[in-house]
Image: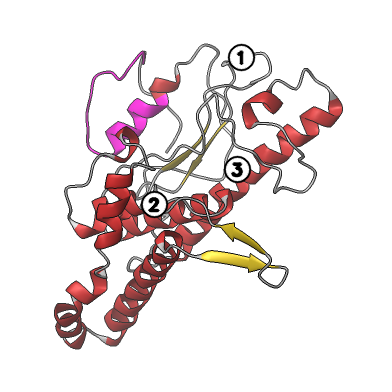
């Protein structure tokens, strides 16, 4: 849930690991709602002092960072604040969903991606994962044009029926669009002549190449970023048949300075990335 991820990264609180808690736990939500102190308010005096000592470029960069952080805080506050929506001249009250969970899946995903972006930009963490949905996801994507009722997992078993497959492909396309949004924002963040994306490695993909038949071979993956010059993007690479995906993970580990001999079921380091 966005509030937990944000607090764990930026508020220095002893919040639970996000993946191990019930996001609708009343006691958890109550403690989060009671803490309404803005992170920027806590460090405001120090931030002003730091800004006064920086160059014009440093001041502009600091302002951009604080505004981005404030923007995420405002959106999180709106997601947590209890409210009611009234339509048809107040005749039909609609209670918003439980606190802590954004109204829409789109906003939920974007918030999580923006929090992840801030975490990398501020060097709050250098390794993170974000899962759009597990293999059994029942997420409804009827908000997408051309996609009616049906869970993501259910539509993945399209049985090559053209209409069902088209819906599944639209959902997959939407996921790729969110990835494009994320790396697009990374590309725009300057880090002294290079971008945040230039200094990062972002791996996007899934665990199956064909969800309909549960085939995991010939898995398509996208690796974005330059890894501080250790990766050469803009190419299509074909690994040898039966190459474990962990060979790629091992190659990325080495580029981060973790010189492990193996990782998972790796058989070596995937070559040709640089």
Disc on res. 2: 2
Seen at 59% across and 65% down, the residue is 85
Q: In which quarter of the image is residue 71?
A: bottom left
Q: Mark 3 points at which residue?
A: 175
Q: What's the CA distance linking mark 2 and mark 1?
A: 33 Å
Tell me the SS state at disc 3: helix
User: Which label lies toward us, 1 or 3?
Assistant: 3
Q: In which quarter of the image is residue 172?
A: top right
Tell me the SS state at disc 2: helix
- Answer yes or no: do the residues labelled 1 and 3 have beta carbons within 8 Å? no
Disc on res. 215: 1
Seen at 53% across and 16% down, the residue is 240
User: Which label lies toward us, 2 or 1?
Assistant: 2
Query: Left or right of 85: which side holds 62?
Result: left
Q: Which of marks 2 and 1 is nearer the N terminus?
A: 2
Range of the magenta residues? 248-266
Nearest to the observer: residue 186 or residue 247: 186
């Amino acid at each position: 849930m966005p509030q937990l991820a944000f607090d764990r990264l930026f508020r220095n609180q002893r919040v639970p690991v996000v993946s191990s808690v019930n996001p609708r736990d009343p006691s958890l939500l109550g403690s989060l709602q009671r803490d309404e102190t803005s992170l920027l308010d806590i460090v405001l005096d120090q931030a002003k002092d730091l800004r006064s000592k920086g160059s014009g470029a440093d001041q502009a960069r600091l302002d951009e960072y604080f505004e981005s952080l404030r923007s995420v805080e405002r959106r999180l506050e709106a997601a947590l604040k209890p409210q009611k929506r009234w339509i048809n001249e107040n005749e039909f009250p609609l209670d918003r969903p439980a606190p802590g969970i954004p109204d829409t899946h789109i906003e939920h995903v974007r918030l999580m991606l923006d929090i992840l972006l801030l975490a990398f930009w501020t060097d709050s963490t250098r390794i993170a994962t974000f899962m759009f949905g597990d293999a059994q996801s029942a997420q409804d994507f009827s908000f997408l044009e051309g996609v009616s009722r049906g869970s993501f997992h259910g539509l993945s078993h399209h049985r090559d029926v053209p209409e069902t497959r088209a819906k599944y492909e639209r959902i997959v396309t939407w996921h790729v669009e969110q990835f494009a949004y994320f790396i697009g924002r990374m590309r725009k963040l300057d880090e002294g002549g290079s971008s945040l994306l230039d200094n990062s490695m972002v791996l996007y993909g899934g665990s199956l190449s064909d969800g309909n038949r549960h085939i995991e071979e010939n898995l398509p993956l996208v690796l974005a970023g330059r890894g501080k010059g250790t990766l050469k993007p803009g190419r299509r690479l074909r690994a040898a048949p039966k190459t474990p995906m962990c060979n790629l993970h091992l190659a990325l580990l080495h580029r981060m300075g973790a010189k492990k001999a193996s990782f998972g079921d790796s058989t070596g380091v995937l070559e040709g990335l640089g």
